[in-house]
Image (cartoon, helix red, strand yellow):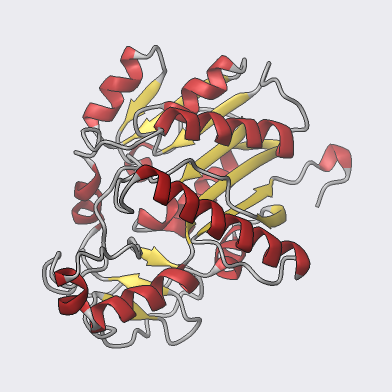
Amino acid sequence: MSQAVPNPGDASSFGSAAASLPACPLCRKSEWSEHLRGTRLRTCRGCGSYLNDRSSSRQEEEAQYDHCASTVVRDEDPVSVSQWSWVSRHLLGKASGNGLAVLDIGCGKGGFLAAAKAGGARVHGLELDPAGVAICRRRGLEVTQGSLFDLGLPEGPWDVITFWDVLDHLDDPRGALDLASRALAPGGVLVVRGRNAAVHAPLKTTYARGRGLLVRAGIPDLSVIHRWGWGPRGWQSLLNQAGLAETALFPGIPTPGDRYGTLGPRLASTALKALVRGAGSSAFALSGGRLYPFPSVLVTGRRADPSRGGG
C-alpha cells in the first residue's frame, strides 16, 4: 500500500455511507454515531474510535491505493533513511542490519526497504499499487504485489515488520496485526506509524464548520483520518490485543519540510514543523509520556521470546 494517498474524511470527496458498517477493531462493537458534521466520520460509542465510512467493502477501500506511485512526495528517501536509522538504533540497539530479516507492509516505492537493505538487512515488501511494485523491482528490491488479506504474509519469521502510515488504511487492522505478530521471530519488533486522531479529528470537524471561508482564504485542510482513527492509547491497545509485549509510544520520527507540498514555501513549512516538533517533544518528555500532542503516532511492540524469559 503506497504511503502517498488522497486526503480522506471530506464529505465532498466520497460516495454514500456503507450499507453495513463494520465492527470497531478496538472494542469489536458496531455502535456508531451519526456522521460528525460536514465529514464522513463516525465515532464508536463503545471506545471512541473513528470510522471513515467511505467504503462498503474491503475491495472498495483497497482500490483507493492501487494508483498512488505517481504522487510526488518530497524528501521521501531521506525520510526513509531516518526511519531505518531510528529502528536500527533505538529498537535493535545497533547501527547495522546485518543478518536481520525485514518486512515492510505497504512499502510504496521502497524507500524504507532500500535503506534497510543498504544497512545489511534481508528485505521484502508487500504493496497493492502495481506501479509502486514496479519501482521497487527496478531498485532491486524483492516485493510481492497484492493484499495481505488475500496472500497472507511472505514466509518468515521476520525480525522486523513495519507498517509506515498503512495500518489505519486497512479494512481489518486487527486481522493484519494478528498476521504480523505470528510472523515475527521470537523477540522480533513490530513498528507502526499512523495518524493521531486525537489531533486530526477535532481539526477535521473545525475545518468542516468553516470550510467555505477557509477555502476562499486559501487555507488547506491538513487533517487526515483514513479508514480508521485512534488516539495514541488506542494505537497501543491494538498492539496489546495482538499479543505483543513491551508495547511503547515514541515521539514521531522527524520528517524534513512539507512532504506533500501543502504548507506553502519550504522554509516556512520547515520552520513550522520544527516548532511543532520541538514543543511536542518537550510536552511529551516533561509529562513522562502522558501528553502526546504529535500529529502522528509511533508505537512499537515485540513478540515474546520464551528463551529469554520474555512475556
Q: Is residue 286 above or below residue 130?
A: below
Of the 4 image quadrants, the one containing the N terminus is: top left
Q: Quadrant of residue 216?
A: bottom left
Q: Residue at x 46, y 50 (%)?
A: 176
Q: Is residue 37 above or below residue 19?
A: below
In this view, the residue in front, 114 or 63, is: 114
Q: Is residue 159 above or below residue 174?
A: above
Specify whether 286 is left or right of 173: right
Q: Quadrant of residue 83?
A: top right
Q: Residue at x 60, y 24 (%)?
A: 101
In this view, the residue in front, 96 or 125, is: 96
Spot occupied by residue 282 in the image (x, y as percentages of width and height) = 70, 62
In this view, the residue in front, 234 or 36, is: 36
Specify whether 308 is left or right of 50: right
Q: From where the camera sits, is residue 24 visible?
A: yes
Q: From where the camera sits, is residue 259 visible?
A: no
Spot occupied by residue 272 in the image (x, y as percentages of width and height) = 47, 56
Spot occupied by residue 106 in the image (x, y as percentages of width and height) = 39, 39
Q: Is residue 52 above or below residue 61?
A: below
Q: Residue at x 38, y 24 (%)?
A: 143
Spot occupied by residue 292 in the image (x, y as percentages of width and height) = 62, 67
Q: Residue at x 26, y 21 (%)?
A: 134
Specify whether 139 is left or right of 118: left
Specify whether 258 is left or right of 278: left
Numbered-mark total: 0
Residue sticking out furthest to the right: 309
Q: Quadrant of residue 90?
A: top right
